Amino acid sequence: MTPFVTTAGMKELERLVDRSGVSYQEMMEQAGQSAARLIRDRWPLEGKRVLVLCGKGNNGGDGFVAARLLAKAGALVTTALVQGDPATPESRTAFARLPPGAAVTRDLDLTVRELAGADLVVDAIFGTGFRGQVPEELEPLFWAARKAGKGGVPIAALDIPSGVEGDTGLYHRCIPATLTVCMGARKPAHLVNWAGEYLGELAVGSIGAHPKVEDAFPGWLAALDLEDFRRSLPGRSHTGHKGTNGRLLLIAGSRQYPGAAVMAASAAVRSGVGYVRLASTSRVCKLVAAHCPEVIDTICRKNSRGGILGDQETVSALLGAAQGSDAIAMGCGLEADQDTLAIVRAFLRQEKPLLLDAGALTALALDPDPLALLAEARCPLLLTPHPGEYARLTGTAPEHNPFDKEHTITGKTKITLLRKGWVTGIFQGEKQLWHFGGCDGLAKGGSGDVLTGILGGLLAQGAEPFQAAQAGVWLHGRAAWLCAQQWSCRGMVPSQLADYLGAAFLEAEQEEG
């Protein structure tokens, strides 16, 4: 796992460090020293023209410390106050410590011209707390800095490239870095899958925190990595057979969404599971058989909308099929109606591991108290909503920043929540894990169906819901990257993803060996 903090978490960590005896001023000094040292390690400075772009906040204060030390190392430093004089007590103190006669400018036009002749640029304008868009008056400076970087001038960003939001990695305009020195800890923007657009090399600088303070800090979050994937995969025996590798019951598809069942089933059979049984209408079963002959059919009666009928006879037949399975995955392409709700209610009362996604979750939200139904479930539950589905279940609005959300569903001990999005959160009780993998090629209808197939297959192979979620999101994200390398994020389609699962497995196994 890779530790990181949110921007709010970093502020709290700094408060704890301050209480431990390391003042905010000393933290700024340590941060600037770390940045200067890492810059000196990478580029020769003697006689080189270095332009340090400083904002009015504490990020600019880090820049003042770095400017002082780079000048001491022999660089010809110009410090540009691109937002005017420093506005915080710490940054004002750091500015006052610049050596007598240091070159300082407040002229934006002159700073833009200086960029053209710089040998190295230090970006200390905005920190991780930046939100929204770059002020209009700074846009010419940002354009000139980007041009300098494209022309081969190294750019060292302090904490984060200016213009990027620390908790989301979103930006309207930013200054891409050659080197980013993040202070104290990684933030979400250092981990998002598109960080390569602006981050450059990432190095972690110090703020002077004592290891005991960092170890005791309760705000650390964890990002899923390859080792987590390997540890969470269910075991597999060389002497096993199809019966010992798990049996998945997949309840999916309708007249309106037949392809969802195809994509979920195709992914499930490539997850390592021994058997996949599809329960759906005759039309959907025929379509899946044409694409995926390994799947076994259980044909269900249909309702007037072309979905699975939720009468007592059909529900009893589905529960009978569940008895011969090791796990159930339900929801891909199901109609969000009362028939589906009846099936969901029945399956919450059985004891096999159950995954609910898509139509099953939307149908569940039709119940007067869906959270009460979930709380009373007898089975281990894995829920995989996207932000809209989660909002319908909980009565909350989708959020811009998922780290601001309190995940109330996870207080139920049998529930594991996998919240999909640009960052995926996995929650169970007090446990939480975040996944920044994948790519924007997954932002297409059907990607979630593939994930459900993978997760269902892992559950059927014996993985606990939290472990299945870890392995499933990593595998799904890695397959997406491999697919995008051949077809591009724009050109790839979800129905191709299952074909890349084998390559993702092989890649992980080869690296492990």
Image (cartoon, grey):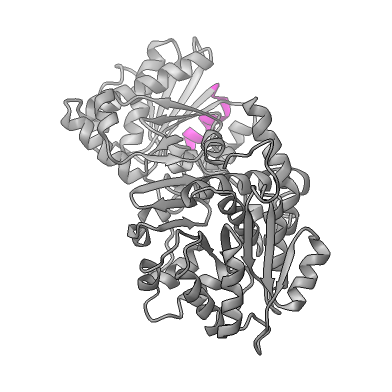
Q: Which residues are magenta?
A: 109-119
Q: Position of residue 298 (x, y in %)?
A: 70, 72
Question: Is residue 504 shown to the viewer in this render?
Answer: yes
| Nearer to us in this view, 303 or 122 | 303
Q: Position of residue 221 (x, y in %)?
A: 38, 41
335, above or below 205, in the image: below
What residue is at 77 percent from the left and 66 percent from the top? 288
- Front-most of residues 90 and 87: 90
Side (left or right) of 506 relative to 90: right
Position above or below: 129 against 358: above
Indicate the position of residue 414 as horizontal and vertical percent values.
39, 58
Q: Residue at x 41, y 52 (%)?
A: 427
Q: Please, is residue 220 above or below residue 248 in the view?
A: above
Determine which quarter of the picture holds residue 263.
bottom right
Q: Main secondary structure of the magenta part?
A: helix
Q: Position of residue 494 (x, y in %)?
A: 70, 58
- Any part of residue 443 in sight: no
Position of the C terminus, as image quadrant, is top right
Relative to 303, does residue 268 appear above or below in the rendering? above
- Describe residue 370's horizontal placement relative to residue 451 as left or right: left
- The residue drawn where x is 74% and y is 74% is 284
Please check the rendered image and state whether residue 467 is part of the magenta-colored stretch, yes or no.
no
In the picture, measured across the screen, residue 198 lies left or right of residue 6, that is: right
Which residue is pictured at 70% across the width and 60% down the height?
265
